[in-house]
Amino acid sequence: MSDQEIMTDVNHVQHMFLHVETSDSICILNVAGHPYRLRELIYMMVNNGCRVSQTTADQYNTFPYDQETVEVHDYMTSIIKAKFIKEQQ
């Protein structure tokens, strides 16, 4: 299947890990969804001042966090798990 076919397949699900930093916290997201929806999610985060980079499952599994993990689901994207760490003020 070509990249174009994957992008237009409404049932295609892409999975990735994202490292996200804001001015007051850092988190790693374990996300899944249609590639267009994930692009929209990343664009919204960057547009709101977040620094976003793709990371690996190993970095997700070893990420030190100090709060509970959370799960968020909407119609188009599932944030399977989000691990947060607050920076020292």
Image (cartoon, grey):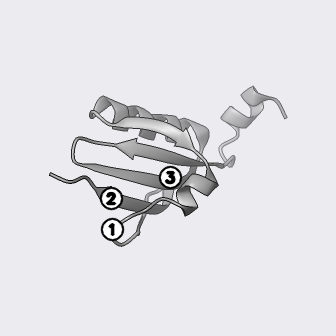
Q: Position of residue 5 (x, y in %)?
A: 76, 32
Tell me where residue 9 sits by quadrant.
top right
Q: Mark 3: which secondary structure?
A: strand
Q: Do the CB atoms of the residues marked 1 and 3 lie less than 8 Å apart?
A: no
Q: Quadrant of the N terminus?
A: top right
Compared with 17, 61 (above or below) is below
The residue under label 2 is: 85
Side of 31 relative to 85 (left or right): right
Q: Secondary structure at mark 2?
A: strand
Find disc 1 in the rendering and name its residue.
Answer: 66
- Residue at disc 1, secondary structure: loop
Of badges 2 and 3, the one in the foreground is: 2
Rendered location of residue 22, percent (x, y): 28, 42
Q: Residue furthest bottom?
A: 68
In the figure, residue 51 lies in which quadrant? top left
Q: Which residue is mark 3?
A: 77
Q: Are marks 2 and 1 in contact (CB under 8 Å)?
A: yes
Question: Residue at coordinates 41% horizontally, 32% vertically from top-left?
Answer: 43
> Front-most of 30 and 33?
30
First-in-chain label (1 vs 3): 1
Whole-percent x, y for residue 36 in the image: 55, 36
Marks 1/3: CA–CA distance: 25 Å
Q: Residue furthest left?
A: 89
Identify which residue is drawn at 34% across, 50% down. Answer: 26
Q: Residue furthest front?
A: 88
Query: Camera-side residue: 69 or 37?
Result: 69
**Identity of the amino acid at label 2?**
Ile
Amino acid of disc 3: Thr
Q: Residue at x 54, y 57 (%)?
A: 60
